[in-house]
Amino acid sequence: MVCESWKAQLDTYVDGEVPHEEMRTFDAHVRNCPSCSADALSRVQLKRAIQVAGKRFTPSAEFRKRMQQSIASRPRRSFRMGWMLAAAAAVVVVAGTLTSTHLGSRPARDQVFSEIADLHVATLASSSPVDVISTDRHTVKPWFQGKIPFAFNLPELQNSQFSLLGGRMTYLEQAPGAHLIYDVRKHHISVFIFQERSLPAGLSDSALQPGKLSFNMETWSRGGLRYFVISDASAADIDSLAKLFKAAS
C-alpha cells in the first residue's frame, strides 16, 4: 500500500507536529492524494467537533453558587482545623489565580490560531477548496454579499506575484467569515476575515513564525474586522500579501 506510511503520520500532520522540513513534502502529498486528503479532512473535522463539544459542558454560575452554599452550610470545625483548611484554600486560590492569569489569554489566542491552521489544512485537503472559483476580485467579493454579516475589500494584484484562486464561507468560534485562497510560487495562502467582536479578546496584531503549527501566520485588526494570513509560504510572502490587504482596507 503506497500511502500506508503517509496515513500512519496523518494525526501528527493534522496536529501540526510534523517537523518543519517535512511539512512541505507532506502538504504536497495530501494535496495530490485523494485518499490521504479525505482522511486528513475527516481527522480535522473530528478534532474541531471535539473542541466545540468540550466548550458546551462548563459549570454554570448557578451551579457554582449552589456548591459554594453547600460548602458554607457544613458544620464548623475546630479553630485549628479551620485555620488549616483556610490556608489550604488560600494556596488553591493563589495557584488558580496565577494559572488563570497565565492561561487566560494565551489558550484562547492559541486555540484560535490552532483552529485557523485546522481550517487552512482542511481546505487544502478538500476536493473542492473554494465555492466561488475566480481570479477576478470583482467576482469573488460580491459572492459573499448576503452570506456573511459584513463587507470587506480585496486588494488589486496587478504587478504582484500573487493570484486569486477563489473563496468560500467558513466559521470560527461559530461566527461566519470569509476564506480567500491565493497562490504564490505553487504555495497556497489562506486569508481569513471575521468580525473582531465575534472572536475572543486578546488577539493582538502579530506575525508568527513556524512553531507547533508549522505555518507562517500574520494577524491584524482593521475597521472592526480581524484578518488572518496563513501558509507554508515564506514569512516575506505572508507579509507582502498582508500589506496588500491592509492597503485595500
Image (cartoon, rainbow, N blue to C red):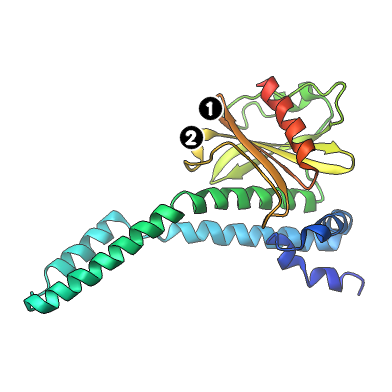
Q: Nearer the viewer, residue 208 or 220?
A: 208
Above or below 217: residue 5: below
Instruction: State the CA–CA distance, disc 2 to disc 1.
Output: 7 Å
Q: Nearer the viewer, residue 193 or 202?
A: 202
Residue 167 falls left or right of residue 89: right
Residue on which disc 2 sits: 197
Residue on which disc 1 sits: 224
Above or below 60: residue 133: above
| Within-10-Å neighbours for mark 2: few <14, some 14–19, many 20+ | few
Q: Nearer the viewer, residue 47 or 232?
A: 232
Q: Residue at 73% x, 58% y: name it.
A: 41
Which amino acid type is marked by label 2?
Answer: Arg
| Within-10-Å neighbours for mark 1: few <14, some 14–19, many 20+ | few
Q: Is there any visible trace of residue 130 in the rendered image?
A: no
Q: Position of residue 33 (x, y in %)?
A: 88, 59
Q: Residue at 64% x, 47% y: name it.
A: 116
Which amino acid type is marked by label 1?
Answer: Gly
Q: Residue at 7% x, 79% y: name it.
A: 78
Above or below 103: residue 70: below
Q: Which mark is residue 247?
A: none
Q: Position of residue 190 (x, y in %)?
A: 73, 40
Q: Nearer the viewer, residue 118 or 90?
A: 90
Residue 38 falls left or right of residue 45: right
Which of the 4 quarters of the picture holds residue 80? bottom left
Cβ–Cβ under 8 Å for marks 2 and 1: yes
Q: Which comes sooner in the sequence, label 2 or label 1?
A: 2
Above or below 129: residue 53: below
Residue 180 falls left or right of residue 174: right
The C terminus - image quarter: top right
The N terminus - image quarter: bottom right
